[in-house]
Image (spheres, rainbow, N blue to C red):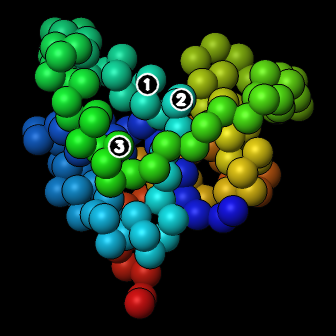
Amino acid sequence: MGGILIDSNILIRLLDKDSEDHASCIAAVTPENVDRFGLCMCAQSMIEFWVVCTRPRLQNGLGFTPTSLAMELERIESVIPCLSEPPDMAAVWRALVTRYHVAGKLAHDARMVAIMSAYGIRSLLTLNSSDFARYQGVQCVSPAMLLATPL
């Protein structure tokens, strides 16, 4: 398939107007760039997005209500396609966490890599490339890098 999977931190910045990365994430995830680069998301990125955006601001969240965030997510889904979960997702994820000795919260990132593996995606649009450095074959792309790609 190819394309570029979008990490949850990019989706979160689309709504976090106080973030220094807000403008670059908005610019990176336009309908034109979705088509040009094959940008897509997955259930894991949507779940992490939901968790952060509905968490109270005092707990490092954005404070959206589930109802208002559902509308925002529907708007995002109208632009960015969401990949379905492959039937062997658990086995692929387990092989990754075992192979790379993943512990704790980093197991969420391994799920992203498992989706990438299932769909033959090698690139991830993210603000946290260090979280994925352990995985061979995963190329992390920042919004700035994506926007600098010549036509």
Q: Position of residue 83 (x, y in %)?
A: 57, 43
The foreground one among 104 and 11 is: 11
The foreground one among 135 and 116 is: 116
Q: Can residue 14 be seen in this view?
A: yes
Element at label 3? helix
Element at label 2? helix
- The residue tagged 3 is 77
The disc placed on residue 138 is none
- As drawn, which residue projects farthest toward the bottom? 151
Q: From the viewer's perspective, tell me whether residue 142 is left or right of residue 15.
A: right
- Is mark 1 in CB contact (under 8 Å) with mark 2? yes
Q: How crowded is mark 1: few (under 14 residues within 10 Å), some or many (20 or more)?
A: some
Q: Nearer the viewer, mark 3 or mark 1?
A: 3
Element at label 1? helix
Q: Where is residue 35 in the image (x, y as percent from the top left)?
A: 43, 70
Q: Where is residue 12 in the image (x, y as percent from the top left)?
A: 29, 36
- The residue tagged 2 is 44
Q: Which quadrant holds residue 77?
A: top left
